[in-house]
Image (tube, rainbow, N blue to C red):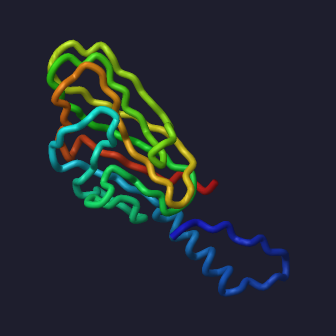
């Protein structure tokens, strides 16, 4: 259910049933804004530049934005507006990881935000947590991708509690 800007009325204008329904739906939309938090429940191999998968159970999804089975790397926007995007995840690796660049990607082609982390020098794991704010239209989607340099055998860690990808509606545009 999307927010709809109500029509401005003048003194003496009658409020119609349609006007009332718009306002009632807006109160509901603002009380429970569109939001989703995807999690991961399995450890899977990862290839640099591909989208991270989020096949676990969603912690919440108030606007049917994520399907853990189909296109599970995506959050698809069903209510237009400005969204806060947040992700936090571990990647395990073997070999020497020199740089890692996680980023948000819109509709498979548009870069939104990128972070760089370098200076890795041994086998292990690393955590990224970052956010971005972006304007979306209905049916836009967003993914988290990671470009890496130097590592082999990269895996998304399976830790439901710590790894997530979330979108929260901040307001209408």
Q: Quadrant of the C terminus?
A: bottom right
Residue in front for this viewpoint, 67 or 16: 67
| Up-down relation of residue 84 to residue 11 (above or below) | above
Q: Is 11 left, or right, of 132 in this rendering?
A: right
In percent of width and height, residue 39 lies at: 26, 50
Q: Residue at x 84, y 75 (%)?
A: 10
Point out the residue furthest to the right here: 11
Q: Residue at x 39, y 45 (%)?
A: 143
Q: Residue at x 28, y 47 (%)?
A: 53
In percent of width and height, residue 28 lies at: 51, 70
| Up-down relation of residue 98 to residue 71 (above or below) | above
Marker count (numbered): 0
In percent of width and height, residue 160 lies at: 20, 47
Residue in front for this viewpoint, 91 or 8: 91
Residue in front for this viewpoint, 49 or 140: 49
Q: Residue at x 54, y 60 (%)?
A: 138
Q: Is 71 left, or right, of 21 in this rendering?
A: left
Q: Quadrant of residue 162?
A: top left
| Up-down relation of residue 20 to residue 38 (above or below) | below
Q: Is 117 left, or right, of 106 in this rendering?
A: left
In percent of width and height, residue 11 lies at: 84, 77
């Amino acid at each position: 259910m999307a927010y709809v800007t109500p029509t401005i009325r003048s003194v003496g204008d009658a409020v119609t049933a349609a006007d009332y329904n718009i306002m009632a739906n807006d109160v509901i939309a603002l009380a429970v804004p569109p939001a989703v938090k995807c999690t991961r429940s399995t450890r899977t191999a990862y290839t640099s530049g591909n989208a991270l998968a989020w096949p676990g159970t969603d912690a919440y999804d108030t606007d049917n934005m994520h399907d853990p089975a189909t296109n599970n790397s995506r959050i698809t926007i069903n209510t237009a507006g400005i969204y806060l995007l947040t992700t936090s995840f571990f990647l395990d690796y073997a070999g020497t990881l020199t740089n890692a660049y996680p980023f948000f990607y819109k509709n498979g082609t548009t870069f939104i935000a990128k972070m760089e982390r370098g200076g890795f020098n041994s086998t292990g794991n690393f955590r990224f947590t970052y956010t971005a704010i972006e304007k979306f239209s209905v049916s836009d989607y967003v993914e988290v991708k990671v470009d890496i340099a130097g590592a082999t055998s990269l895996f998304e860690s399976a830790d439901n509690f710590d790894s997530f990808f979330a979108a929260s509606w901040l307001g209408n545009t």
